[in-house]
Amino acid sequence: MARRPEEYRTSLWIDWCPGCGNYGIVTALTQALAELELDPRKTVIVSGIGCSGKTPHYINANGFHTLHGRAIPFATGIKLANPKLTVIVHGGDGDLIGIGAGHFVALGRRNIDITVIMHNNQVYGLTKGQASPTLPRGIKTKALLKPNIQDMLNPIALALAAGYTFVARSYAMDIQHLKEMIKKAIRHRGAAFIDVLQPCVTYNDVYTVQFYRKALYKLEDDPSWDPVVRSPEEEAEKKARAFLKAMEWGDRIPIGVFYQNPLVPSFEDRLAERLGKEYLENPPALQSIADGEGRPIVSTEAFKKIFAQSIVRVRKRGKQQG
């Protein structure tokens, strides 16, 4: 029986500002989850701090509202402990590529099968509209006393450089397009990133609905555009084309899939090669650690041995230095 988007919404009242792009993101997400018929019990929504951090509260699935900039490491632990789960990260532009930039890069390098959805409104919406890393230099939004003094960080270019194997951009007010990008990202086995442009109706009076209506165009409308890598020989060419498109910002801004490489093994697959197929079939989170009466069944002897060896090394080093 097909699932309905309403099944993935909690009854909690959404308290974002009226007109906020986050409403479109949640709508597109619930539609994507329903069309993919994902089991809410095997789906995890992870967020950090900011307006986007509330997303797990509104989705009827497992949810973790974590620390500022730390959604990705939380999601990494969840996914590696149980690779059978569908893990989706929601974070703002400041949360993911400001304080969380190091974690953002690490996820791309590892190519862990996690989908990262960035709510990109160019400002810190929850803390009253300061410039975020994605606001171009020289732009003055209404919350800034003077134009932004720092250069912008291009999230698409950063994701490509970091090693994400699925990189896309969409628009919060085009729910149909965003839904399709989310579905493609979740289906992709590997690190997937979607830069979602969204108006902040309260603090950003530059990148508005009217601005995006004029500037946005879809990559898929070009019959010659093909972002999928089908052989190792194509990788450099496809990534170079994606970088060129990523540099377009201003009067013309592309949305769609910039790059997709299904040939790179995910981090989970690499771990399975090293640890054996048991890792994927019976991952750590599903293993028993106690019997029916609660008695531990995991041996601690190996840990005791490692600890004892460490003590010996520390004492030996202390004698040498003394």
Image (tube, rainbow, N blue to C red):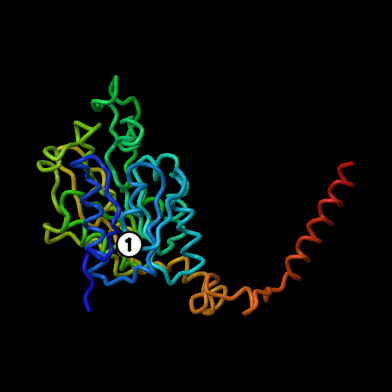
Residue type at mark 1 is Asn
User: Residue pushed farthest top?
Assistant: 145
Q: Is residue 202 left or right of residue 285?
A: left
Q: Label 1, secondary structure: give it.
A: loop
Q: Quadrant of the C terminus?
A: top right
Q: How many marks?
A: 1
Tell me the residue at 36%/69% (across/down).
Answer: 263
Res. 6 image quadrant: bottom left
Q: Is residue 10 left or right of residue 213?
A: right
In the displayed structure, 233 sits above or below 288; it is above
- Where residue 276 appears, as percent x and y from the top left, is 55, 78
In the displayed structure, 226 sits above or below 37; it is above
Tell me the residue at 35%/53% (across/down).
Answer: 57
Please rate how many residues cluster around mark 1, counting C-alpha atoms within 10 Å: few if below 14, some from 14 to 19, many from 20: some
Q: Is residue 225 left or right of residue 183?
A: left
In the displayed structure, 126 sits above or below 255; it is above
Q: Quadrant of the N terminus?
A: bottom left
- Where residue 157 appears, as percent x and y from the top left, is 33, 47
Res. 129 image quadrant: top left
68 or 151: nearer the eye? Answer: 68
Q: Is residue 303 left or right of residue 15?
A: right
- Where residue 309 appears, as percent x and y from the top left, is 80, 61
241 or 72: nearer the eye? Answer: 72
Q: Tell me the residue that label 1 is attached to.
A: 60
